[in-house]
Amino acid sequence: MTPAADSGPARKDRTSPADDAGDVTAPPGPAPQPKNRRFKSVTGTRRSIALLFLLPTLVLLGALVVYPIGYSVVRSFFDQSGGSFIGFDNYETLFTRADTKAAINNNIFWVVLAPTVATVLGLIFAVLTERIRWGTAFKLVVFMPMAISMLAAGIIFRLVYDQDPEKGAVNAVWVGIHDTFAESSAFPKAHPRPNAPLAGKSGGPYLTKDPVKAGGNVLLPLVGVAADQMPGGAKPAKQATSAPNKVTGTVWQDFTLGKGAGGINNVDSTELGYPGMKIEAVKGGKVVASTSAAADGTFTLPASADGARLRLPASNFEEAYNGVDWLGDKKFFTIHLGGFDLYLNIVTTSIMVAYIWMWAGFAMVLIGAGLAGIPRELLEAARVDGATEWQVFRRVTVPLLAPVLAVVLVTLMINVLKIFDLIFIIAPGATQDDANVLALQLYRSAFSEGNEGLASAIAVLLLLLVIPVMWFNMRRLRREVRR
Amino acid sequence: MSTVDESVKAKRSIAGRIGEKVSGGVLQFVLILIGALWLVPTIGLLLSSLRSTEDMSASGWWKVFSKPSQLTFDSYASLLENSDITRSLVNTALITVPATVLVIVIGSLAGYAFAWMEFPGRDWWFLIVVGLLVVPVQLALVPIAKLFGDIGIFGSLIGVILFHVGFGLPFAVFLLRNFFAEIPRELLEAARLDGAGELRLFVRVVMPLGGPAIASLGIFQFLWVWNDMLVALIFTDTDSQPITVALQTQVRQFGNNVDVLGPGAFISMVIPLAVFFAFQRQFVSGVMAGAVK
């Protein structure tokens, strides 16, 4: 392992026993002997030179990172203009105002859901790719989105989530699946002419004005389906051949494009049938028989339809299913917690999917590195003992990976806490309030609303949330530095 | 006893082999599907950027598979004639390159000092720097905007560069100090015996040996700055804005500006993707080490 791969969070891959062993052999606390040797022999540097090497870093960090911490903490206790001290009022506002509450609500779901899903996916991918020859190619594909900006990813997903099923990929697939399982109606715009034998309010159902008789032939003319919207299987309409003891008829488009030829309420060969149109015979409010039309628009009903009126149910005329508004504000669920409602809405969820698309690769690569460090013999031993693959995964692999999984999860949580670009780009103006998060609210408070007090309070809240990680990093490093 | 064992083993291995074949096929299929799922959004952007605005407003990008004649470089051509966009691309480079070089140089100096020089409270100072690793960028936006306004560099390239250097340093110092500390003492001692001064030791011995870590750091910082939108959104004006900021102004009217956003986003991705494919190893170690940022 090169030192480069050995630093940062990756360093945590090494299980702690190695570190502990180091601590056992060396007495706790600074070990003066090696320390002195190391420094005297090599540098013996004057302090002024050390200061010279450190000066640029200390100045820049002091001015750009440390000073803002102090400034924000102090500023968060002052009002919008900065003129008067208002104590914790900004923090109270943070938990009471609608937009900041929405931001906190969404941040909670972001921090809990997005890192968990990304880590679980990363774990699954890492384990599965170990078993195939082209695992590296797969990893490359999944890891690639890490290289691009959140702005580019945002634009990519704006295209993916386009509401129009003709343009947005997700809705195209969604509507396709929906229409496969739920029969779509083919004639959303079809309706009878005013003087037709059918009547009913716009959108159906349409009912024949008179009862039908067995042996009779019924004509059900409609108009209004555009030529390019006609179902592909439609054939020229035909007059049905009447049969005794049966009710027969034709349902068709009583209109010829450009020609207007033929008579109104007359079946002409230039006109098309309505294939699949559903027809019900209704007697005393009950459906006594039903059928659907053939390609040429003809249909046949049994004798039981005698004396009934024919109805074209509204399901024939429903507007086409238009998919889901993926960037809308619909809530999946709401949990009432005292004065605070926790809810998850669809726009936040959709943006989380984009985030997971970007970061699952990160989890996969880190977990993959951890996986490579697991001794094969341990897995083999479990298999020889008769454990199934699932048991090996559940009882051996996952527990051994626990430290890596924790690192990945924590890293992603910190990352998600500060999510800004994706929401700024993906959420359209109409639902940006619903997709709000703390980092976005900070930006808005500071630079649109001009309320630096509130913005500083949000900044301090973000800092407080990462302080446990800061403390953990420093503690872990203190041990390593002293070794 | 042993024969029973063996027959059981044999039985299991035949059944096991068949099972493996089947599940292997299913596994491959599932992974191909997932891989495709991961690629589709990016392919969608690429194909969208290669279609005219009229085609884009009429139908989805997948229509090019049935109508390849729709493919055109018109959007790219007009984008590269758009001086706002080209200037912002130049700005992106003008911000990213200095911000990366400065972080490497300044971070190396400090990393070396923390690793090999002796001064009071050294380890504590280093711990403080590491603690700053996770400070959210957001915290500094308001105060630094004020500070830069006071000293007159708000809206300039220098301001953004400085900001990125400041927030890049904790990671740089952390990574490089750990790497430099692993340099064998004998090497440094030998150079010292040859009469090398502190600066010479640093430039001729430490920096070259730090190559791998510097590469990881450089790639991470380069991508971080190149891909940044938030910092530039606040600290640049229309003359100094990078491509990310220039593009985000178009997002509010997404449908109307697809001809700019599609190719613009793709052009902004080209360099990061090239870096990704060319330096996979360093990219992985850089991203893995620096992701806490």
Image: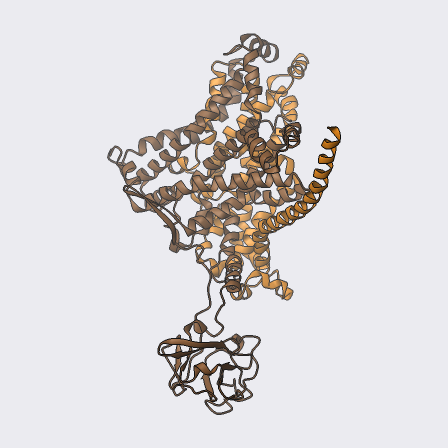
Q: Residue reaching furthest bottom?
A: A263
* Chain in orange on the image: B
Q: Determine whether A157 is above or below A366 in the image.
A: below
A336 left or right, relative to A143 = left
A183 left or right, relative to A439 = right
Q: Residue at x 64, y 66 (%)?
A: B69
- Which residue is at the front of the view, B212 or A196? A196
Q: Determine whether B14 is above or below A331 in the image.
A: above
Quarter of the image where one finds residue A316 = bottom left
Q: Determine whether A37 is above or below A421 in the image.
A: above
- Which residue is at the front of the view, A421 or B229? A421
Is residue A168 in view? yes
Q: Residue at x 45, y 79 (%)?
A: A224
- Which residue is at the front of the view, A212 or B151? A212
Please tell me the colour of chain A: brown
Q: Determine whether A183 is above or below A143 in the image.
A: below
B193 left or right, relative to A168 = right
User: Residue A403's spot in the image, x, y percent?
Assistant: 53, 29
